[in-house]
C-alpha cells in the first residue's frame, strides 16, 4: 500500500504538463503560435509563387502494326533463314520498344539537335537581346536531354497511348508533343528501311550461292516482301504511332504548382511546428531548475 502511494506520488510529481495545463499553456502563448504559423505560411507562399506555371500538352496516338501478314507468314515458314536476314522479328516492332525509343536519350538528343532546342530549353540562360548565352556559359547537352526526358510521359489509355509533355511554356509543350511523335515515326521508319535494305543485300548474296529452284523461290519471295516493306515505309509517314488526337494549345491545363493546396498544407505544418516550439521552450524552462 505504501509502495503504491509512493509510486503515485513520484508519478504525480513527474507530470510536468497535464492536459489542462497544456490547453492553458497554448492559450497563453497564442500570439507566438499565430506569429510562427503566419511566418511559416508566408515563407511557403513566397516559395510557391516564385515557381513558374507548368502546363501539360497531350497527344492521343494508336500503335501501328509495322509488319505485313505475308512477311509474318514467310518468317513462320522459313524461320531460320528469315531470322538470319533479320526478318520477322516481332520484338523489334513491339509497342513497348517504340515507347522505349521515344523516351531514350539517343532519340531525345537527335530531336534537340535537329530542332535546335537548346535556347528554348535553357531560355533563362539565353540573352535574346544580344543573341548569346549569358556570361558565355553554354549549357551541357546532357542536361538538356535529362530535362526534356523528365518532361515526357507515356501512359496507357485502353488500346491507345497518351504522349504528354510538361513545360513552362504551353506553346512549346504543344509544339514539342506533336513534333516528337512525328520525329519518332521518321526515326523508326528510317531504321526499318535500313534494316530491309540490309536484309535484301543478304538475301541476294544467298541467292547467288544456291542453285536449288525451291530455295531460289523462297529467297525471291523474301526479297519481294522486303521491297514491299521499303515501299510501305517510304509512303507511310505515321509508321509507329498514328495520331488520333494531336496536342492542342491550352493555357488552362496547368499541372503545377498546386499553390492553394501547398499553402494550406504549409499552414498546417507551420501550426504544428509552432506548438512544438512553444512546448519545447516551456519544457526547457521547467527542466532548467532541476539541472542547476
Image: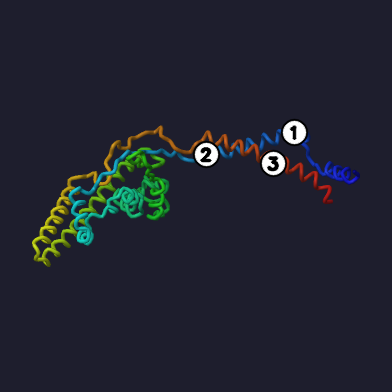
Cβ–Cβ below 8 Å for labels 3 and 2? no
Is residue 136 visible to the viewer in this orientation of the structure?
no
Q: Position of residue 171 (x, y in %)?
A: 35, 38
Q: How many marks?
A: 3
Is residue 99 visible to the viewer in this orientation of the structure?
yes
Mark 1 and mark 2 lie on one chain; the one further toward the N terminus is: 1
Determine whether 89 is above or below 29 in the image: below
Question: The N terminus is located in which quarter?
Answer: top right
- Residue where numbered disc 2 is placed: 48
- Residue where numbered disc 3 is placed: 276
Real-space Cα distance between discs 1 and 2? 33 Å
Tell us which disc is closer to us: 3 or 2.
3
User: Which residue does the image show at 26% across and 44% down from the upper left?
Assistant: 64
In this rendering, would 33 be left or right of 183? right
Q: Position of residue 263 (x, y in %)?
A: 56, 35
In this rendering, would 165 be left or right of 34? left
Amino acid at each position: 500500500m505504501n509502495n503504491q502511494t509512493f509510486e503515485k506520488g513520484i508519478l504525480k510529481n513527474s507530470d510536468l504538463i497535464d492536459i489542462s495545463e497544456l490547453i492553458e499553456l497554448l492559450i497563453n502563448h497564442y500570439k507566438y503560435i499565430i506569429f510562427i504559423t503566419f511566418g511559416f505560411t508566408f515563407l511557403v507562399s513566397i516559395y510557391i509563387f516564385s515557381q513558374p506555371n507548368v502546363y501539360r500538352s497531350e497527344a492521343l496516338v494508336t500503335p501501328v502494326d509495322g509488319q505485313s501478314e505475308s512477311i509474318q507468314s514467310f518468317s513462320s515458314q522459313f524461320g531460320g533463314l528469315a531470322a538470319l536476314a533479320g526478318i520477322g522479328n516481332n520484338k523489334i516492332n513491339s509497342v513497348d520498344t517504340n515507347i522505349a525509343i521515344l523516351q531514350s536519350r539517343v532519340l531525345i538528343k537527335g530531336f534537340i539537335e535537329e530542332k535546335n532546342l537548346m535556347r528554348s530549353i535553357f531560355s533563362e540562360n539565353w540573352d535574346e537581346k544580344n543573341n548569346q548565352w549569358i556570361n558565355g556559359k553554354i549549357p551541357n547537352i546532357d542536361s538538356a536531354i535529362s530535362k526534356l526526358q523528365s518532361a515526357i510521359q507515356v501512359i496507357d489509355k485502353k488500346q491507345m497511348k497518351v504522349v504528354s509533355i510538361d513545360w513552362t511554356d504551353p506553346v512549346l509543350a504543344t509544339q514539342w508533343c506533336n513534333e516528337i511523335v512525328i520525329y519518332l515515326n521518321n526515326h523508326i521508319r528510317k531504321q526499318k528501311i535500313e534494316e530491309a535494305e540490309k536484309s535484301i543485300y543478304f538475301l541476294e548474296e544467298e541467292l547467288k550461292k544456291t542453285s536449288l529452284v525451291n530455295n531460289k523461290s523462297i529467297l525471291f519471295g523474301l526479297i519481294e516482301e522486303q521491297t514491299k516493306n521499303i515501299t510501305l515505309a517510304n509512303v507511310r509517314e505515321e509508321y509507329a504511332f498514328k495520331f488520333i488526337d494531336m496536342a492542342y494549345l491550352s493555357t488552362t491545363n496547368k499541372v503545377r504548382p498546386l499553390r492553394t493546396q501547398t499553402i494550406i498544407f504549409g499552414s498546417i505544418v507551420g501550426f504544428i511546428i509552432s506548438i512544438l516550439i512553444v512546448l519545447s521552450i516551456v519544457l526547457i524552462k521547467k527542466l532548467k531548475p532541476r539541472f542547476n
